[in-house]
Image (tube, rainbow, N blue to C red):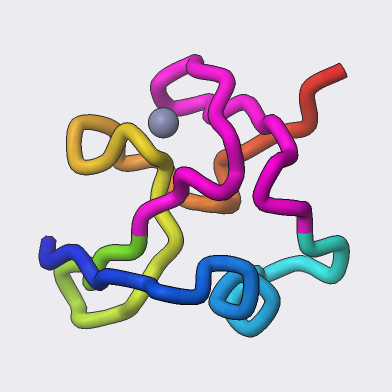
Amino acid sequence: MEEIIVNNKQKYLQDNYPFDDVPALTDKKKCIHCGTIITVGDYKVFNDDIGQELIFCPNAPDCDGTVIDWFDVD
Ligand SMILES: [Zn+2]
């Protein structure tokens, strides 16, 4: 996987977030792959094995969770 450096993280998230309710960069989510509470703005972007840009867990590449693996924290 190759990391993509994103300069405007808020805009990138708005343009690429797969669901309607785009979170704030300061929101906390739980990544179910690594079990960690993450801050949304710490996300990383990688090209996956088939050349698709995906929003990954901040713990990538150690964690292979992507944005769809994040759940709300109460
Ligand atoms: Zn993770």
Residue at image x 46%, y 44%?
42
Residue at image x 69%, y 76%?
14
Task: Please check the rendered image and state whether residue 24 is part of the magenta-colored stretch, yes or no.
Answer: yes
State the residue lying farthest toward the front. Answer: 7
On screen, residue 27 versus residue 9, left or right, reads right
On screen, residue 6 versus residue 26, left or right, reads left
Return the x and y of residue 39 as percentages of the image width and height.
58, 35
Q: Residue 23: name its quadrant.
A: bottom right
Quadrant position of ligand 1: top left
Quadrant assignment for the C terminus: top right
Q: In the figure, 15 relative to 56: above or below? A: below
Residue at image x 49%, y 15%?
35
Return the x and y of residue 34 as percentages of the image width and height.
40, 21
Task: Please check the rendered image and state whether residue 27 is part of the magenta-colored stretch, yes or no.
Answer: yes
Return the x and y of residue 37 as percentages of the image width and height.
57, 20
For the magenta stretch, what is the residue range? Answer: 23-44
